[in-house]
Image (tube, helix red, strand yellow):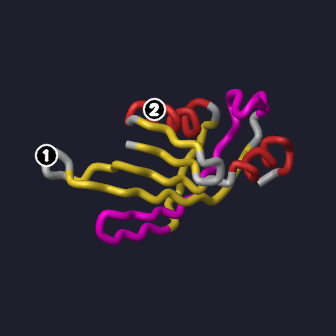
Amino acid sequence: VSLTLVQTGEVILGREAVTVIFAELHRQAFVAQTTVGSRTVQGTQTVVEATFAGRHVAEFAGISPAGTTVSFPYVLAYETATGGAGEAEIVAIRAYLPFEELIRQLRGGGP
């Protein structure tokens, strides 16, 4: 599986590496919840609109934790393919994450 961070162009390869990125964002750097707003499925593609809301509890992007509350909308676009067991597997994710907004909030800009 690959994860592309669209705003930066960074690509993370491998299921384990992608899992680590999501775990860091949702459970390590932040205590966070994701609320799904909408989901659209067409063939092998799924697009999810969601809101990330949480509290900053560990260093992130060089910013020390201050318990800051953050909230921002984001979009994930998934590409699936039929796997060996005949079930759909995620093969690629494109993440549209507003990192600039997240950093602004962490520096005291508020949600």
Q: Is residue 16 left or right of residue 25?
A: left
Q: Are marks 2 and 1 in contact (CB under 8 Å)?
A: no
Which circle marks residue 41 in the picture? none
Q: Secondary structure at mark 2?
A: helix
Is residue 54 in the magenta section? yes
Residue at coordinates 59% horizontally, 53% vertically from top-left?
6
**What residue is pinned by disc 1?**
85
What range is drawn magenta here? 38-66
Residue at coordinates 77% horizontally, 44% vertically from top-left?
103
Location of residue 88 in the rendering, given as x and y in whole percent from the top left corner = 24, 54
Location of residue 47 in the rendering, given as x and y in whole percent from the top left corner = 45, 64
The quarter holding residue 106 reads top right
**In the image, residue 27 above or below residue 33:** above
Q: Quadrant of the C terminus?
A: bottom right
Q: Quadrant of the N terminus?
A: top left
Residue at coordinates 58% horizontally, 43% vertically from top-left?
10
Q: Is residue 43 left or right of residue 38?
A: left
**What residue is pinned by disc 2?**
17
Q: Amino acid at mark 1?
A: Ala
Q: Residues within 10 Å of mark 1 (few under 14, many from 20)?
A: few
C-alpha span from label 2 to label 1:
23 Å
Is residue 59 in the magenta section? yes
Which residue occupies the foreground of this view, 65 or 15?
Answer: 15
Location of residue 63 in the rendering, given as x and y in whole percent from the top left corner = 78, 31
The quarter holding residue 80 reads bottom left
Q: Amino acid at mark 2?
A: Ala
Going from N to C along the chain, the mark reached first, 2 or 1, is 2
Q: Is residue 83 left or right of residue 47?
A: left
Residue at coordinates 39% horizontally, 63% vertically from top-left?
46
